[in-house]
Each structure stands twice: as C-alpha cells, then as structure tokens.
Image (tube, helix red, strand yellow):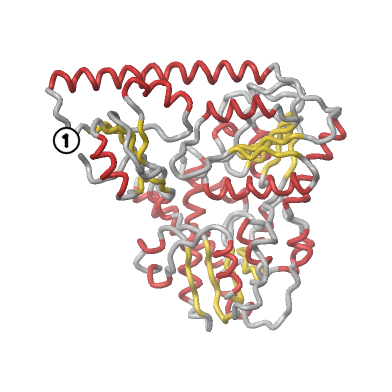
Amino acid sequence: MSNKSVDTYFFDANTALETATQQNRIQCTPRVDGLQVCYYDGKKLKNAPKNCIHVPLKKVYKYFLKTKNRFPTAINYDNTRYSDDKMKILIEEYTTSIKSYLVDNLELIKKYQKKIKKNQPDFSEKRLRVFIAACRQSVVMKEIYANMVKSFRELGCEVLFFTQKNDMQACSVLPAMKALYKFNPHITFNINHIYNEYLHKDVFNFIWFQDKMPILTNKEPLNLRQRDFIFTLIYGLKQDLIQKGYENIHCKIQSFCIDTDIYKCRKKIKRKEKIVFIGSSYKAAFDAVPISKTLKLQILYELLEIYIRKGPLSIQRKEDFFIKYQLDERIHLGHITNYIERDMMIKEIIKLNLDLDFELYGYGWDEDEKLKFYNKGVLKYGKDISKVYNSAKYSLIVGGYVMQQRTLESSSSGSIPVVLDVRHNDADYNKNFDQSMIFFRTPRELTKLLKNTKKYNFDSLVNSHSYAAFAEKTLTIVERNL
C-alpha cells in the first residue's frame, strides 16, 4: 500500500476503523483536500467515526448508486484470512458491482435529463426559483456562486444552492440532476459552462464566462437556446465568441463583483506603509509553454525590455510578435506575457527599493529564489484576504485587464490599488474609475507615484460592482422576455 491516502474499500473492518481513526486527508485537487473515506465489508462496527462507512459487499452497487460520497479508488485486504482463490472471487464480485454502478449511473443521468427537458416552469407563480450548483473543489467559483445565491434571495427569489455538505462528498452529476428535476427552476445560473442541453426551452439560463474556456475558441457549436444569456468577464472573451461567429447572440460584459460584507474596512487593523500582492505565480504556466527553451527566453527578454522601457504591449503589438515568432497558438504568447506582467513586473518593482515593505501571498512564490523572501504563504479566500488588504496602504494589481477581482477586494478593504496600466487594451474599462486607483506603465514610475498624498474614494468603484446589481440585471432580462 502507498503511504499516500486515498478513499478505500476495506475487506477487514478493523483495518478500516484503524485507518479512519487517523483522519487522513486525501488530495481532491492540487489545492483542495478532503477527509479520507474508509468503506468496509463484514459486520457493522459500533461507534465508528463518520468516515468509516459500513457497505457490505452485496450492497456496494445500491450504496454507490444513491450516495453523494466519493468513490473508492483503492481496495485493501490487509488482515484478512481469506485464501487467495476466495480473495480473487471477492474482488471480482466487488469489481462487477462497481462496473454495473458506473453503467447504470450514466443511464440514470440520461433518464433524469430527459425528465428535466420536459419539466416546464410556471411563470405565474409568485416567486421565481433559481438553481445554482457548485463544487467545493472549485474554491473561488464556489464563493462567487454563494454571493449570487445571497443576492437572488435578497431580491425575493427561492434559490436552491446545490453543493457538497461535507468534505467526503464528490461533485456528482446524478444527485445534481435529481435536485434540478425536483426543484423545477425558472432560472439557472452557471459560470464558464453553458449546461443547457437538458433544460426545458422556457427556462432562463445565464452563463458568466470568466475564463477562456475551450468552447469559446474551438469549432464545437454552442447550440444556444432562445433563453440562454451570456455574460463575459472581459471584452476579450466576448471577442472570442464574435470570432467564432456568434456576434448576434445576447452577450454583455460583466466585470467581477464584490461582497462588501466580507471585503470592508476594518478599523481595528492598523494600516502600514507597505504594498501587497495577492495571487499565484505564473511561472509554472510559463515553463509549460511547449516551445524550445531558447526561443521562449528570447521572446521573454525581448518583450520584457519593452515592458520596462515603454509599458504593456498593445493588442496589435502582441499580434505582431505572434506572427514574428511563428507560434502555433496565441495562448502560448499569452502565457509568456502573463508571466511578464505578473512575476517579472513584481521583480522589477522590488528592484526599485521603494521605501515600503513588500509582501507576496499565493502559490508558487516560495519556489522562486528571488521572490521567496517576500512570500507570506497562501491565504484562505474571503475574510483573511480582506484583513491583509486592511493592513496595507497599497495593493499591487498586475495583469491583462484593470477590473480584476483583487482590484475590487483591495479597494473595498481600503487599500489603494496600484494597477499596471493596460487601459488601452481593456475595451470594457470605465474611465470614471480613473480617480480610484494609481496607474503605472513602467515600474520606475512608481518611485514618484507612491509618494503622492492624494486621498482616494472607492465608493463609486465598489458600489457599481455589487452582486446584487448583477442579480437584478438578470431578473430584468427575465421580465423583459416573458
């Protein structure tokens, strides 16, 4: 057996109990873990911990067809007295049950999707029902979904927020389909996915694309319904849809939103003369670009020189470099420029020796020899991030667009956003917010910019990016299209 913990089916109950009592954590994703689930055969144990679950071999099929818990990925037969032949028979029986479950699980999903397709919502009802599903493994997305749930409820909607109830459950499709069918919503809300193929034609489906998903750039058709309404986080994502041939669909820009109950000024925290950056390193993505190291470094240093002397490239200049270096995909150049705009800009700013403390929070900074000294670890999403912003006079915002999540979180927490000036590339940026942040094109400009004593007001910036305003916008669309 490997020392790495995984969800396991045990043929010996006591071994399962011993393992479950250790409360081991398994890695669900690189950044999210869960409590190890120990299923076991044999007689039921008394007073076993919640992650030690009795599933007799003959009930394996029925149990996994109904449970929301994660599926075991290993079998353990330590401390059993079965002969090799008997053990082989038991394992075959277990494997057969699991295979049957997998087949029937898919069939049940299809069955429920057909039922959902025929489930017509009644819009004469007093309250609109909104269905939102999220997975605990998508930490940031789940928080965004939760904020939308809160906003829809405050606007009088009945909302079903379908997600795991504990850290032993999986992101299972079948339970979600069952819940969707029973709830029979008027509205569904999704991030980065359309999920419309099983919806009744009368259901309003809102999709908020926040990332460059394959469906935006590949040749696969969107198959949109009349009541599918798309929002994109930035203009570039909308442009992807236009280039794909969907210029006539309903598609609006919707920047990030902010939860002011979490991100707010906290008077008890002393604000210090320091600048903080919260976000992960892009070095791993840069290293993974599938071109030769020599060419990659050549592009990196040529572009970096431009960023240091003149500032961020225009969209056209990026296209010129894409053609010049005959790269296979634009996303490869995107990973290089992302690395420059984040990691390399941070290094250049540190070189200035500003009369400010500098702190980095996020993944990957501890792996960079020049930046690990400034690394303060990974923050839990939400209140902890707000606390750090409350402790800093300035917050560094670097990247390809202005209205990032961190721009809103920091300003709402009273920290002045110091933003890499990419307004010339940001078609959806509102110039009314110019006075709410400090813009810089090259690192050396910060030497003077950070010495000003100007007072900044973030009210307009924060208030115009509320989740409530976005939720209200979707309900207005529903009203107009009934």
Residue 309 appears at what percent x and percent y?
A: 55, 67
Residue occupying the far left of the picture: 83
Quadrant location of the C terminus? top right
Quadrant location of the N terminus? top left
Residue 443 appears at what percent x and percent y?
A: 55, 71
Nearer-the-camera pick, 341 or 35: 35
Q: Quick check: can you spot residue 311?
A: no
At 29% from the left edge and 30% from the top edge, which residue is drawn?
A: 43
Residue 240 appears at what percent x and percent y?
A: 63, 37
Q: How many marks?
A: 1
Return the residue at label 1: 79
Taking 143 as reference, is 99 left or right? left
| Above or below, 124 relative to 19 | above
| Above or below, 30 relative to 411 | above
| Above or below, 8 relative to 274 | above
At 36% from the left edge and 29% from the top edge, which residue is drawn?
A: 55
Quarter location, residue 307: bottom right
Taking 410 as reference, is 39 left or right? left
Characterize the local packing of mark 1: few (<14), some (14-19) or many (20 or more) Cα atoms within 10 angstroms.
Answer: few
At 31% from the left edge and 44% from the top edge, which residue is drawn?
A: 20
Nearer-the-camera pick, 89 or 381: 89
Q: Amino acid at mark 1?
A: Asn
Residue occupying the far front of the picture: 46
Q: Quick check: can you spot residue 320?
A: yes
Quarter location, residue 412: bottom right
Residue 331 appears at what percent x and percent y?
A: 51, 42
Label 1: state its secondary structure.
Answer: loop
Nearer-the-camera pick, 121 or 366: 121
Taking 327 as reference, is 143 left or right? right
